[in-house]
Structure formats: C-alpha cells, structure tokens
Image (cartoon, helix red, strand yellow):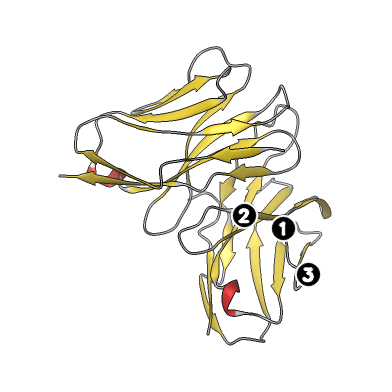
Amino acid sequence: DSGVTQTPKHLITATGQRVTLRCSPRSGDLSVYWYQQSLDQGLQFLIHYYNGEERAKGNILERFSAQQFPDLHSELNLSSLELGDSALYFCASSAQGRGYTGELFFGEGSRLTVL
Amino acid sequence: AQKITQTQPGMFVQEKEAVTLDCTYDTSDQSYGLFWYKQPSSGEMIFLIYQGSYDEQNATEGRYSLNFQKARKSANLVISASQLGDSAMYFCAMYTGGFKTIFGAGTRLFVKA
C-alpha cells in the first residue's frame, strides 16, 4: 500500500460526458502528479501540482483540467469525453524537498472506459 | 530534450535465469535520477530501484540491479533468478528536477516455467 488513494477505481461512461477523478496523496506529501496510460502504452505525464500550485504541465488536452485543494487532495476533470480518452489514469505523490530524488508513490489508478 | 528509450517491447526468459531489460536516456542535465517500476497485470506501479547520476556504485535491491553506464547513457535493469511472478511490464523512468518524471514505453517480460 503506497498510501496514495484514488477514486473511483473503475468508471464507465459515454462519449461527450464529463468525469472527475480524485486523488489523496500520502500523508505529508505536497506534490501530486497525474499520468495517463493508454492501452499497452507508457505513462504520459499530464500535470504536477505542488502545495496547491501548478508546477509543470505535459501534453494535457484542453478538455482536461486539474486542481489541488488546500487539504492537498487533487482532482482531474475530463470533459467532452472521446473514445480515445479510455485509459488508466494514475495519480502519484512525492515528498518533494531537499534531497528529493524523484521517487513517486503511485495510487492504484482509475480505469476509465468511454463507450 | 529529455527522453527515455526502451527498445524491447517484449522479452522472454526461462524461470531461474537472469534477464536484462534495456533503457537508454537522454538529458543535458548533470543531476538526475533513474528509476525502474514494475507493473503487473493488476495494474499498480511498483517501485523497484533507483540510481542517482552521481552514484558511483550500481544500485542493487535484492534480485534487482541497475547496470548504470553514464557515458553511454544507459540504465539497464538486471533481474537475477527470474520467477514466474516477475512476469509484468517494466518501465524505466528519469527525473531531472524539472518537476516531472518521464517514463519509457515499457518492456513486457514473460517468464516461462
């Protein structure tokens, strides 16, 4: 158990709909990262938040948005869903600070299926 | 540009034998970290091993070792005495301090009994 909690674990929805994925980082971790893993692909970096502020952005679609709240949990919002958005979405957290190596602690992922 | 390349989409290994999974990286940064993660069929990402760019010794964690060749920019994962439970996807990753960790495309390992 990494200590990172993601909900829901599975989600099935239709094209054009909007969903929200939620992530609670490990206790004490200020950084939250979101990654997308399409079928049999590597992990594509979407976005990184640190203590409520956006720190880095990857190839995140304009239909996607994220935020990190004062209690440090994060939400990834996916709207106007398309079939190609079907993927496993990972949240990861880290104890970013002095001596940070880059190790990430992953949640179990949210598997989104768009029909 | 920073990049991780894993050129082996799939690998087969006989149980109890050793296997090497290849990873090359590209960065102009002097300080960086290299990681390997395992993703079994259940989907979770499991941290295996870490190598810092200034570490002189190759990292080892149990049956896992990282063959770090800085001049060649390679960070191959060696799994000794393969077990059936090692069958999984393996991802090489790199952190360079740019607030994100990037991943390679992965190598699927099949361990044969």
Image point 46% across, 40% down: which residue?
A: B7
Q: Residue furthest top?
A: B56
Which class describes the residues within 10 Å of circle 3: few (<14), some (14-19), or many (20+)? few
Q: Which residue is mark 3?
A: A62
**Dot placed on the residue nearer the N-terminal end, 2 or 3:** 2
User: Is there CB contact under 8 Å for labels 2 and 3?
Assistant: no
Which of the 4 quarters of the picture holds residue A59?
A: bottom right
Using the image as rendered, state which of residue B107 and residue B42 is in the foreground: B107
Q: Which residue is mark 2?
A: A44
In whole angstroms, how far apart are the C-alphas of marks 1 and 3? 9 Å
Image point 63% across, 16% down: which residue?
A: B54
Rendered location of residue B37, percent (x, y) = 48, 42
Say which element carries label 1.
loop
In whole angstroms, how far apart are the C-alphas of marks 1 and 2? 8 Å
Task: Give the left or right position of residue A65, taking residue B93 as reference.
Answer: right
In whole angstroms, how far apart are the C-alphas of marks 2 and 3? 15 Å
Task: Give the left or right position of residue A104, taking residue B22 as reference.
Answer: right
Both on one chain, marks 1 and 2? Answer: yes
Rendered location of residue B39, percent (x, y) = 43, 50
Both on one chain, marks 2 and 3? Answer: yes
The amino acid beneath tag 2 is Gln
Res. A59 mark: 1
Image point 72% across, 27% down: which residue?
A: B28
The amino acid beneath tag 1 is Asn
User: Is there CB contact under 8 Å for labels 1 and 2?
Assistant: yes
Say which element carries label 3.
loop
